[in-house]
Amino acid sequence: MLIGQGLERKFPKVISPTAHGVIDYAHSAFFFTVGLLCSRSNKRAACAAFATSGFILVQSLLTDYRYGVKPVISFETHGKMDYVFASSSWLFPLAFGFRDTPAAKIFEMNSLAEASVVGMTDWNSDRAHQERIST
C-alpha cells in the first residue's frame, strides 16, 4: 500500500482542488529554491531538487484544475501521481547519491508533508473541473 492511499482514508478532505493547485506551485517554487541553495555545496542534491521542481511544475501546468494551463491530466490522475511521489521522495537522496547530508533531510521531510497533503485533498475530478470552469 502506498503512503498516500492509507492516509487518504484517514484524513478529513479539507484541501480543495484549487487549494491543492496553490500548494503545488508553492511546492515547485520551494524545490527550485532548494536547488539554487544547494547548487554550490551539493550538486547532486541541487539536481534532485531541480528535477523535483520541474516535475511538480509540469504536472501542475497539465492538470485539469483551476491553475492548470493545458488540462491534459485529470485531477484524479494527478492524485495517483502524487501518491507515488509521496511514497518515493525519501528515496531521492539514495538515488542521486547524497544520502546522510543535510539536504537529504529535506527530501525525507517532503515525503511526510506530501503524504499529508495527499491524504487531506479531495481528489474529486468533477469538482476540480467545475472549479476550473467557474473562474
Image (cartoon, rainbow, N blue to C red):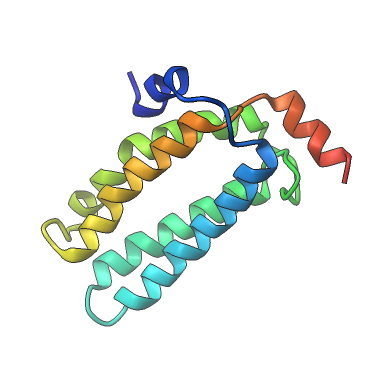
**Above or below: residue 33 compared with residue 127:** below
User: Where does residue 31 sit, x and y in percent of width and height?
Assistant: 42, 62
What residue do we see at 58% from left, 35% from top? 78
Q: Residue furthest bottom?
A: 40
**Above or below: residue 43 compared with residue 91:** below
Q: Is residue 40 shown left or right of residue 62?
A: left
Q: Viewer-proximal residue, 16 or 28?
A: 16
Q: Viewer-proximal residue, 38 or 102?
A: 102
Q: Viewer-proximal residue, 115 or 80?
A: 115
Q: Residue furthest left?
A: 100
> To which quarter of the image does residue 45 belong?
bottom left
What residue do we see at 42% from left, 36% from top? 116
What residue do we see at 26% from left, 73% from top? 43
User: Where does residue 67 sit, x and y in percent of width and height?
Assistant: 72, 50
> To which quarter of the image does residue 33 belong?
bottom left
User: Where does residue 131 sit, x and y in percent of width and height?
Assistant: 80, 37
What residue do we see at 33% from left, 43% from top? 111
Q: Residue furthest right?
A: 134
Q: Is residue 60 shown left or right of residue 67?
A: left
Q: Is residue 84 shown left or right of residue 121?
A: left
Please identify the quadrant where the N terminus is shown.
top left
**Above or below: residue 67 compared with residue 30:** above
User: Where does residue 4 sit, x and y in percent of width and height?
Assistant: 41, 28
**Number of marks:** 0
Q: Is residue 69 shown left or right of residue 36?
A: right
